[in-house]
Amino acid sequence: MNINRLLIANRGEIAVRIIRTCQLLGIETVLVASEADLDSVPARMADNLINIGPAPTQQSYLNIDNVIQAAKQSQADAVHPGYGFLSENSAFASACIENDIIFIGPTIEQLDAIGDKLKARSNALAADLPVVAGGSVETLAQAVKIASDISYPILIKAVSGGGGKGMKVVRSEPELEEAITLAQAEAENAFGDDRIYLECYVETGRHVEVQILADGSTAVHLGTRDCSIQRRYQKLVEEAPAPALEDSLRNRIEQAAVDFARHLSYRGAGTVEFLVDVGRNSFYFLEMNARIQVEHPVTEAITGFDLVAQQIRVAEGRPLGMTQEDIQFYGHAIECRLNAEDPSNNFIPSPGTITRALFPAGEGIRMDSHIETGSKVPPFYDSLLGKLIVWGKTRNEAVSRLQQALSACHLEGVATNVDLHALILSNASFRDGGVDTQFLPALLETDNG
């Protein structure tokens, strides 16, 4: 079935991103927007606009009934959920299908199989992927036993987790009970599910992920991304391909991701994430995200594929139309997430009005943003203002180009992390490539000291 009218159940830069692809494909767009977003850039770009409710997410972007009603009212053929919000919510996908609306994403069964982190671990084991030692817990006694078996430090994770919510590092048994209580409270507040599990905490691992495309029968990978530069499990800088990996290790990671997608008979775009211990030449399955990723542009930059267009193609029931041999990789790409937050004040969010927005342009530079001069940054949502993406023939060229692009980026009216990105890019370890997840915390500690 051809999709002629598509409802975008999201906001911000990903809404702009989806609208642009729909314009290229000749698909009419319907955007749902909360009362706080009715005068936003994507609201003005979309062909149709529907007020989805008050600003708080539970009353707007997370309100399944309101989104479904908007899709029916606008006679949309399909819904694209973007990332976050309802993008991996199987109840929402089920509601779409029950109302004869195409959900642009995997099947309900696949969402259930990987949205629950414990089920995802079980599926990874069934697909012969290595996983970090750990297990689910229901009582403190169980937690004490598992933590003792796998040895401290351990990582508490929310079963329905994402975005660092419900994650706590515990280094000794006396810390365990309080950390579990805090993790469960965070998980319940963020996902309505307080279930947790424990894993062995790999102190100096790298976060490497693989982009997957599949149509239910054919699965291919579009290479690796490195997302190791994180603060409190929130990614800040991403690049493709992942630097400083031996070809044999890279090939094993990519093949493991494809094997996992094939095990699930996966359909659509997805990302399989791994923790890589380069020193031991080993890697472990972390999770799979059944949606478009924030960092997808770096993969697009080195492959030439439009991942949103590929999502739509598969959702229309068409075959993938490519094999692994059809995918070629060119150059290197890096993305910086530009956030409205104050790094000098414990990264406190900085809502307000953008009094000046000047973005760089030129060869190898891409800016994905929903911000312009005069834009409001509401206090209700993620602080992401946009993503600065650069491409170069080599990694060194990409880093140099990104430094120049950052210096030409001017955002005023709210605090931003632009200067922090400049600090990261000037660091010798980053320029060498292959930093681990402890890089940014150590850099911040040194800079503050």
Image (cartoon, rainbow, N blue to C red):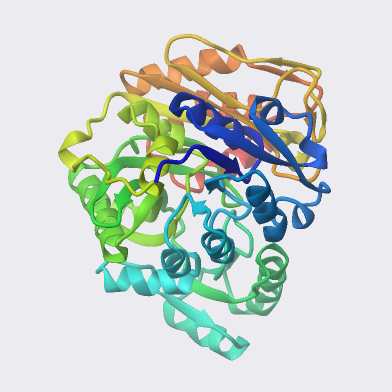
**Residue 305 in the image, given as x and y percentages of width and height:** 34, 31
Q: Give residue 407's quadrant in the image.
A: top right
Left of 121 or right of it: where is 139?
A: right
Q: Is residue 221 above or below residue 337?
A: below
Foreground: 32 or 4? 4
Q: Which residue is most to the bottom?
A: 141
Which x, y percent locates residue 408?
A: 61, 11
Q: Residue 338 sits in which quadrant? A: top right
Q: Residue furthest top?
A: 362
In this rendering, position of residue 136 left or right of residue 29: left
What residue is shown at x 55% (from left), y 40% (from top)? 6
Give 446 or 384, whichever is nearer the viewer: 384
In the rendered image, the quadrant that contains the C terminus is top right
Left or right: residue 24 versus residue 267 is: right
Q: Residue furthest left?
A: 325
Which residue is painted at 79% across and 27% down in the image?
414
Residue appearing at x 51%, y 61% in the figure: 97
Q: Is residue 322 visible?
A: yes
Where residue 131 appears, as percent x and y from the top left, is 35, 68
Q: Is residue 275 above or below residue 344?
A: below
Q: Residue at x 57, y 13 (%)?
A: 360
- Percent x, y of residue 402: 49, 19
Number of marks in the rendered image: 0
Residue 280 seen in this snapshot: no
Q: Up-down: is 115 above or below 81? A: below
